[in-house]
Image (cartoon, rainbow, N blue to C red):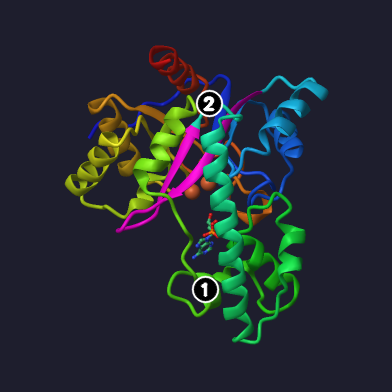
Amino acid sequence: MKSLARFAPGPSIDLHAHSNMSDGTMSPSELVRHAATIGLKAIALTDHDTLDGLEPATLAVKEFELDLEVVPGVEISAEYDYGILHILGFFIRSDDPELQKSLNFLRIQRQSRIAKILSKLSAQNVFIREEEVRKVATGGVPGRPHLAGLMFRKGYVKTMQEAFDRYLRKGACAYVPKVKLPASKALQLIISAGGIPVVAHPYSLNQEDPDRFEEALLSLIDKGLQGIEAYYPKHTKDQTRMYVRLASKFDLVVTGGTDFHGANKPGVKLGEFPDRPPLPYSLLEEMKKRLDNTR
Ligand code: AMP
Ligand code: ZN
Ligand code: FE
Ligand code: FE
Protein backbone atom coordinates (compact mmCIF):
# COMPACT_ATOMS: atom_id res chain seq x y z
CA MET A 1 0.00 0.00 0.00
CA LYS A 2 1.17 3.51 -0.81
CA SER A 3 2.53 5.30 2.24
CA LEU A 4 1.25 8.67 3.36
CA ALA A 5 3.16 11.50 1.76
CA ARG A 6 5.52 13.05 4.30
CA PHE A 7 5.18 16.78 4.43
CA ALA A 8 8.38 18.77 4.04
CA PRO A 9 9.43 20.72 7.12
CA GLY A 10 8.33 24.34 7.02
CA PRO A 11 5.69 26.54 8.57
CA SER A 12 2.89 24.51 10.12
CA ILE A 13 -0.75 25.12 10.94
CA ASP A 14 -3.69 23.86 13.00
CA LEU A 15 -7.15 24.33 11.50
CA HIS A 16 -9.31 23.23 14.44
CA ALA A 17 -9.06 24.88 17.86
CA HIS A 18 -11.49 25.98 20.58
CA SER A 19 -11.26 28.87 23.02
CA ASN A 20 -13.15 29.57 26.22
CA MET A 21 -15.79 31.33 24.14
CA SER A 22 -17.10 27.75 23.74
CA ASP A 23 -15.66 24.78 25.63
CA GLY A 24 -11.90 25.32 25.44
CA THR A 25 -10.01 26.69 28.42
CA MET A 26 -7.75 29.37 26.88
CA SER A 27 -9.11 32.80 26.06
CA PRO A 28 -8.87 33.72 22.36
CA SER A 29 -5.92 35.98 23.23
CA GLU A 30 -4.13 33.23 25.18
CA LEU A 31 -4.78 30.78 22.36
CA VAL A 32 -3.21 32.92 19.63
CA ARG A 33 -0.22 33.76 21.84
CA HIS A 34 0.23 30.06 22.57
CA ALA A 35 0.05 29.25 18.86
CA ALA A 36 2.67 31.88 18.02
CA THR A 37 4.93 30.76 20.88
CA ILE A 38 5.05 27.19 19.60
CA GLY A 39 5.85 28.48 16.12
CA LEU A 40 2.61 27.90 14.23
CA LYS A 41 2.05 30.04 11.15
CA ALA A 42 -1.76 29.86 11.17
CA ILE A 43 -4.63 28.55 13.26
CA ALA A 44 -8.36 28.38 12.66
CA LEU A 45 -10.48 29.35 15.63
CA THR A 46 -13.48 27.02 15.32
CA ASP A 47 -15.55 27.49 18.44
CA HIS A 48 -18.89 25.68 18.73
CA ASP A 49 -21.91 27.84 17.93
CA THR A 50 -20.21 31.23 18.38
CA LEU A 51 -18.12 33.73 16.45
CA ASP A 52 -17.42 35.88 19.51
CA GLY A 53 -13.80 34.73 19.84
CA LEU A 54 -12.78 35.89 16.38
CA GLU A 55 -12.45 39.59 17.10
CA PRO A 56 -10.48 39.24 20.36
CA ALA A 57 -8.19 36.71 18.64
CA THR A 58 -7.50 39.08 15.75
CA LEU A 59 -7.00 42.03 18.09
CA ALA A 60 -4.51 40.04 20.18
CA VAL A 61 -2.50 39.19 17.04
CA LYS A 62 -2.17 42.93 16.38
CA GLU A 63 -1.59 43.95 19.97
CA PHE A 64 1.19 41.41 20.52
CA GLU A 65 2.50 41.76 16.94
CA LEU A 66 2.31 38.02 16.38
CA ASP A 67 3.48 36.38 13.17
CA LEU A 68 0.29 34.33 13.02
CA GLU A 69 -2.67 34.12 10.68
CA VAL A 70 -6.09 33.51 12.26
CA VAL A 71 -8.61 31.83 10.00
CA PRO A 72 -12.16 32.72 11.05
CA GLY A 73 -14.06 29.52 11.70
CA VAL A 74 -16.97 27.89 13.46
CA GLU A 75 -18.08 24.33 14.31
CA ILE A 76 -21.75 23.38 14.05
CA SER A 77 -23.31 20.08 15.16
CA ALA A 78 -25.69 18.60 12.64
CA GLU A 79 -28.31 15.86 12.68
CA TYR A 80 -26.99 12.45 11.67
CA ASP A 81 -28.55 9.11 12.47
CA TYR A 82 -25.48 6.88 12.65
CA GLY A 83 -22.85 8.85 14.52
CA ILE A 84 -21.66 12.38 15.22
CA LEU A 85 -21.68 14.93 12.41
CA HIS A 86 -19.85 18.22 13.00
CA ILE A 87 -19.47 20.75 10.21
CA LEU A 88 -16.58 23.21 10.26
CA GLY A 89 -16.96 26.50 8.43
CA PHE A 90 -13.76 28.26 7.38
CA PHE A 91 -13.45 31.89 6.27
CA ILE A 92 -17.03 32.71 7.21
CA ARG A 93 -18.01 36.39 7.39
CA SER A 94 -18.47 36.94 11.09
CA ASP A 95 -21.14 39.61 10.57
CA ASP A 96 -23.42 37.42 8.45
CA PRO A 97 -26.93 37.97 9.93
CA GLU A 98 -28.36 34.54 9.06
CA LEU A 99 -25.38 32.72 10.53
CA GLN A 100 -25.54 34.90 13.65
CA LYS A 101 -29.26 34.22 14.00
CA SER A 102 -28.87 30.44 13.77
CA LEU A 103 -25.92 30.35 16.16
CA ASN A 104 -27.92 32.43 18.60
CA PHE A 105 -30.76 29.89 18.35
CA LEU A 106 -28.31 27.04 19.03
CA ARG A 107 -26.89 28.83 22.09
CA ILE A 108 -30.39 29.30 23.53
CA GLN A 109 -31.11 25.62 22.93
CA ARG A 110 -27.86 24.71 24.70
CA GLN A 111 -28.96 26.68 27.75
CA SER A 112 -32.28 24.89 28.05
CA ARG A 113 -30.52 21.57 27.50
CA ILE A 114 -28.15 22.35 30.38
CA ALA A 115 -31.14 23.12 32.62
CA LYS A 116 -32.58 19.68 31.79
CA ILE A 117 -29.26 17.96 32.49
CA LEU A 118 -28.96 19.79 35.83
CA SER A 119 -32.36 18.58 36.88
CA LYS A 120 -31.45 14.98 35.94
CA LEU A 121 -28.21 15.37 37.88
CA SER A 122 -30.02 16.60 40.99
CA ALA A 123 -32.12 13.41 40.87
CA GLN A 124 -28.75 11.63 41.24
CA ASN A 125 -27.78 13.87 44.18
CA VAL A 126 -25.37 15.90 42.09
CA PHE A 127 -26.18 19.53 42.75
CA ILE A 128 -25.05 22.22 40.32
CA ARG A 129 -26.81 25.54 39.85
CA GLU A 130 -27.37 27.24 36.49
CA GLU A 131 -25.52 30.25 37.83
CA GLU A 132 -22.41 28.14 38.44
CA VAL A 133 -22.52 26.97 34.82
CA ARG A 134 -22.94 30.55 33.58
CA LYS A 135 -19.81 31.53 35.49
CA VAL A 136 -17.63 28.93 33.78
CA ALA A 137 -19.24 29.08 30.32
CA THR A 138 -18.49 32.77 29.96
CA GLY A 139 -18.97 32.78 26.18
CA GLY A 140 -22.60 31.69 26.52
CA VAL A 141 -21.98 28.29 24.89
CA PRO A 142 -22.41 25.89 27.82
CA GLY A 143 -21.67 22.23 27.13
CA ARG A 144 -21.01 18.99 28.91
CA PRO A 145 -17.28 19.70 29.41
CA HIS A 146 -18.26 22.67 31.61
CA LEU A 147 -20.50 20.40 33.69
CA ALA A 148 -17.80 17.73 33.94
CA GLY A 149 -15.35 20.38 35.18
CA LEU A 150 -17.79 21.60 37.83
CA MET A 151 -18.58 18.04 38.96
CA PHE A 152 -14.85 17.40 39.29
CA ARG A 153 -14.15 20.60 41.23
CA LYS A 154 -17.12 20.05 43.53
CA GLY A 155 -15.85 16.57 44.32
CA TYR A 156 -18.65 14.52 42.77
CA VAL A 157 -16.18 12.69 40.50
CA LYS A 158 -12.45 12.00 40.57
CA THR A 159 -11.87 12.90 36.92
CA MET A 160 -13.80 14.71 34.20
CA GLN A 161 -13.88 11.43 32.30
CA GLU A 162 -15.72 9.83 35.21
CA ALA A 163 -18.36 12.57 34.93
CA PHE A 164 -18.95 11.54 31.31
CA ASP A 165 -18.85 7.82 31.98
CA ARG A 166 -21.21 7.86 34.98
CA TYR A 167 -23.56 10.74 34.11
CA LEU A 168 -23.10 12.64 30.86
CA ARG A 169 -22.28 10.24 28.02
CA LYS A 170 -24.98 9.20 25.59
CA GLY A 171 -27.11 6.62 27.37
CA ALA A 172 -26.01 7.64 30.88
CA CYS A 173 -28.50 8.77 33.54
CA ALA A 174 -28.23 12.54 32.98
CA TYR A 175 -27.85 12.50 29.20
CA VAL A 176 -29.94 14.94 27.20
CA PRO A 177 -29.41 15.16 23.42
CA LYS A 178 -28.36 18.49 21.95
CA VAL A 179 -30.62 20.33 19.51
CA LYS A 180 -28.82 20.21 16.16
CA LEU A 181 -29.38 21.70 12.73
CA PRO A 182 -30.21 19.55 9.72
CA ALA A 183 -26.97 18.95 7.80
CA SER A 184 -28.27 20.81 4.74
CA LYS A 185 -29.02 23.86 6.88
CA ALA A 186 -25.58 23.88 8.54
CA LEU A 187 -23.86 23.52 5.16
CA GLN A 188 -25.95 26.23 3.47
CA LEU A 189 -25.49 28.68 6.34
CA ILE A 190 -21.73 28.41 6.00
CA ILE A 191 -21.85 28.77 2.23
CA SER A 192 -24.14 31.83 2.42
CA ALA A 193 -21.74 33.38 4.92
CA GLY A 194 -18.96 33.04 2.33
CA GLY A 195 -17.29 30.08 4.03
CA ILE A 196 -16.03 26.63 3.05
CA PRO A 197 -17.98 23.84 4.79
CA VAL A 198 -15.86 20.86 5.84
CA VAL A 199 -16.82 17.65 7.60
CA ALA A 200 -14.98 17.57 10.95
CA HIS A 201 -13.29 14.41 12.31
CA PRO A 202 -15.04 12.16 9.78
CA TYR A 203 -14.26 9.01 11.80
CA SER A 204 -17.08 10.11 14.11
CA LEU A 205 -19.68 9.43 11.41
CA ASN A 206 -19.19 5.82 12.49
CA GLN A 207 -19.18 4.53 8.92
CA GLU A 208 -16.35 2.04 9.03
CA ASP A 209 -17.23 0.28 5.81
CA PRO A 210 -15.52 2.31 3.01
CA ASP A 211 -18.53 2.01 0.68
CA ARG A 212 -20.92 3.21 3.37
CA PHE A 213 -18.56 6.06 4.22
CA GLU A 214 -18.38 7.10 0.59
CA GLU A 215 -22.18 7.05 0.39
CA ALA A 216 -22.46 9.25 3.47
CA LEU A 217 -19.87 11.64 2.05
CA LEU A 218 -21.66 11.84 -1.30
CA SER A 219 -24.92 12.69 0.39
CA LEU A 220 -23.18 15.57 2.21
CA ILE A 221 -21.52 16.75 -1.02
CA ASP A 222 -24.99 16.81 -2.54
CA LYS A 223 -26.02 19.23 0.21
CA GLY A 224 -23.01 21.52 -0.32
CA LEU A 225 -20.03 19.98 1.50
CA GLN A 226 -16.70 21.18 0.09
CA GLY A 227 -14.03 19.63 2.28
CA ILE A 228 -12.93 16.88 4.64
CA GLU A 229 -10.83 17.09 7.81
CA ALA A 230 -8.56 14.22 6.85
CA TYR A 231 -5.86 14.98 9.43
CA TYR A 232 -7.10 14.53 12.99
CA PRO A 233 -5.30 13.10 16.03
CA LYS A 234 -7.71 10.19 16.39
CA HIS A 235 -7.55 9.05 12.76
CA THR A 236 -5.61 5.92 11.97
CA LYS A 237 -3.19 6.00 9.03
CA ASP A 238 -5.63 3.93 7.00
CA GLN A 239 -8.48 6.33 7.72
CA THR A 240 -6.36 9.35 6.80
CA ARG A 241 -5.34 7.66 3.55
CA MET A 242 -8.95 6.93 2.68
CA TYR A 243 -10.09 10.49 3.44
CA VAL A 244 -7.29 11.98 1.32
CA ARG A 245 -8.12 9.59 -1.52
CA LEU A 246 -11.83 10.47 -1.42
CA ALA A 247 -11.02 14.19 -1.27
CA SER A 248 -9.12 13.86 -4.49
CA LYS A 249 -11.84 11.67 -6.06
CA PHE A 250 -14.58 14.21 -5.27
CA ASP A 251 -12.50 17.40 -5.53
CA LEU A 252 -12.81 18.31 -1.84
CA VAL A 253 -10.39 20.50 0.07
CA VAL A 254 -8.33 18.62 2.65
CA THR A 255 -8.01 20.19 6.10
CA GLY A 256 -6.58 19.07 9.40
CA GLY A 257 -6.55 20.12 12.99
CA THR A 258 -6.14 18.87 16.52
CA ASP A 259 -9.46 19.98 18.05
CA PHE A 260 -7.45 21.65 20.79
CA HIS A 261 -9.55 22.42 23.92
CA GLY A 262 -6.74 23.34 26.36
CA ALA A 263 -7.16 21.64 29.75
CA ASN A 264 -10.58 20.29 28.69
CA LYS A 265 -8.80 17.75 26.45
CA PRO A 266 -5.58 17.15 28.34
CA GLY A 267 -4.11 14.71 25.81
CA VAL A 268 -4.35 17.06 22.84
CA LYS A 269 -1.57 19.55 22.07
CA LEU A 270 -2.05 22.41 19.62
CA GLY A 271 -0.46 21.63 16.23
CA GLU A 272 0.67 18.11 17.23
CA PHE A 273 -0.45 14.78 15.82
CA PRO A 274 0.56 11.52 17.51
CA ASP A 275 1.71 9.65 14.42
CA ARG A 276 2.36 12.21 11.75
CA PRO A 277 4.41 15.37 11.24
CA PRO A 278 2.81 18.82 11.68
CA LEU A 279 0.53 20.07 8.90
CA PRO A 280 2.08 22.28 6.22
CA TYR A 281 0.91 25.77 5.34
CA SER A 282 0.21 24.55 1.79
CA LEU A 283 -3.13 23.06 2.98
CA LEU A 284 -4.29 26.58 3.77
CA GLU A 285 -3.07 27.85 0.41
CA GLU A 286 -5.22 25.23 -1.30
CA MET A 287 -8.24 26.41 0.70
CA LYS A 288 -7.61 30.00 -0.31
CA LYS A 289 -7.42 29.00 -3.97
CA ARG A 290 -10.79 27.29 -3.57
CA LEU A 291 -12.21 30.42 -2.01
CA ASP A 292 -10.97 32.59 -4.89
CA ASN A 293 -12.59 30.21 -7.39
CA THR A 294 -15.97 30.18 -5.65
CA ARG A 295 -16.34 33.83 -4.69
P1 AMP B 1 -21.66 18.90 24.14
O1 AMP B 1 -21.39 19.93 23.07
O2 AMP B 1 -22.24 19.49 25.35
O3 AMP B 1 -22.47 17.73 23.63
O4 AMP B 1 -20.23 18.33 24.56
C1 AMP B 1 -19.45 17.71 23.59
C2 AMP B 1 -18.03 17.60 24.08
O5 AMP B 1 -17.96 16.76 25.22
C3 AMP B 1 -17.14 16.98 23.02
O6 AMP B 1 -16.47 17.97 22.29
C4 AMP B 1 -16.15 16.15 23.82
O7 AMP B 1 -15.00 16.93 24.07
C5 AMP B 1 -16.84 15.90 25.14
N1 AMP B 1 -17.32 14.52 25.22
C6 AMP B 1 -18.42 14.00 24.63
N2 AMP B 1 -18.56 12.70 24.94
C7 AMP B 1 -17.54 12.39 25.75
C8 AMP B 1 -17.14 11.18 26.43
N3 AMP B 1 -17.85 10.04 26.35
N4 AMP B 1 -16.00 11.25 27.17
C9 AMP B 1 -15.31 12.39 27.29
N5 AMP B 1 -15.63 13.54 26.69
C10 AMP B 1 -16.72 13.54 25.92
ZN1 ZN C 1 -15.63 21.30 21.88
FE1 FE D 1 -16.33 18.33 16.88
FE1 FE E 1 -14.10 20.74 17.80
Image-quadrant location for residue 170: bottom left
* Front one among 147 and 271: 147
Locate the C terminus and report the quarter of the image it occupies. top left
x, y (%) of residue 207?
27, 52
Helix, strand or loop at mark 2? loop
> Are the residues at dot 1 and dot 2 in contact (C-beta closer than 8 Å)?
no
Residue type at mark 1: give it: Asp
Magenta region, mostly helix, strand or loop? strand
- Vertically, is 260 above or below 150? above
x, y (%) of residue 35?
68, 32
Locate the N terminus and report the quarter of the image it occupies. top left
Residue type at mark 2: give it: Phe
The answer to if 220 sits in the magenta stretch is no
- The residue lying at 47 percent from left, 58 percent from top is 179
Residue hosting label 2: 91
x, y (%) of residue 78?
41, 50
Q: Which residues are magenta?
A: 69-89
Residue hosting label 1: 165
Q: Callout 2: few (<14), some (14-19), or many (20+) C-alpha neighbours within 10 Å?
A: many
Foreground tag (1 vs 2): 2
Helix, strand or loop at mark 1? helix
Q: How many marks?
A: 2
Q: Callout 1: few (<14), some (14-19), or many (20+) C-alpha neighbours within 10 Å?
A: some
Looking at mark 1, is its residue's CB closer than 8 Å to ligand 1? yes
Sequence order check, earlier mark of 1 and 2: 2
- The residue lying at 76 percent from left, 26 percent from top is 59
Which residue is at the far left?
211
- Vertically, is 185 above or below 208? above
Q: Indicate which disc residue 282 carries.
A: none
